[in-house]
């Protein structure tokens, strides 16, 4: 078999190019969508301060909780939302594997 391709180098190149093109087309068809989506772990803290407006809740509740939660191990980021009904929602997102 090696003698066949040594005697016909152009045929060997054509076969090699066809195999490379088939591999290039096959790699585009790989099912990448089957990989799982990994969401980092998160904790949500909810609190309410009846009768308070958003500014009051932000100053008296949200900031206090954020200051106490700041510096927790493996904390990636923190987001908070205070609304006019006196409700606070703080979401703490941690690194994967914690």
Image (tube, rainbow, N blue to C red):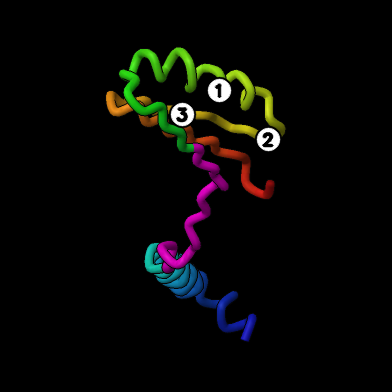
State the image quarter where residue 58 is shown. Answer: top left
Camera-side residue of 61 and 26: 61
Residue 88, x across and y down, in percent: 41, 30
Q: Secondary structure at mark 1?
A: helix
> From this viewpoint, is residue 88 visible?
yes
Q: Earlier in the sequence, mark 1 or mark 3?
A: 1
Mark 2 nearby-residue class (10 Å; few <14, some 14–19, many ≥20): few
Q: Which residues are magenta?
A: 31-45
Residue drawn at 42 percent across, 68 percent down: 31
Give the Cα distance between marks 1 and 2: 15 Å
Residue 63 lies left or right of residue 82; in this view the side is right
Q: Is residue 43 magenta?
A: yes
Residue 54 lies left or right of residue 32; in this view the side is left
Residue 41 lies left or right of residue 82; in this view the side is right
Q: Residue furthest right?
A: 73
Q: Which label number is shown at residue 81?
A: none
Q: Nearer the viewer, mark 2 or mark 3?
A: 3
Residue highlighted by disc 3 = 79
Residue highlighted by disc 1 = 66
Q: Quadrant of the N terminus?
A: bottom right
Q: Secondary structure at mark 3?
A: strand
Q: Secondary structure at mark 2?
A: loop
Q: Nearer the viewer, mark 1 or mark 2?
A: 1
Q: Earlier in the sequence, mark 1 or mark 2?
A: 1
> How many labels sit on residues?
3
Residue drawn at 41 percent across, 27 percent down: 49
Give the Cα distance between marks 2 and 3: 15 Å
Q: Earlier in the sequence, mark 2 or mark 3?
A: 2
Mark 1 nearby-residue class (10 Å; few <14, some 14–19, many ≥20): some
Residue highlighted by disc 2 = 74
Residue drawn at 62 percent across, 27 percent down: 69
* Residue 50 to residue 44: above or below: above
């Amino acid at each position: 078999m090696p003698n066949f391709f040594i005697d016909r180098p152009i045929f060997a190149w054509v076969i090699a190019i066809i195999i490379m093109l088939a591999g290039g087309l096959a790699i585009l068809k790989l099912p990448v969508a089957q990989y799982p989506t990994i969401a980092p772990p998160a904790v949500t803290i909810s609190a309410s301060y009846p009768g308070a407006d958003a500014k009051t809740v932000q100053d008296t509740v949200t900031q206090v909780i954020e200051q106490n939660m700041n510096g927790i191990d493996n904390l990636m980021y923190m987001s908070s939302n205070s609304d006019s009904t006196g409700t606070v929602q703080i979401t703490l997102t941690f690194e994967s594997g914690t």
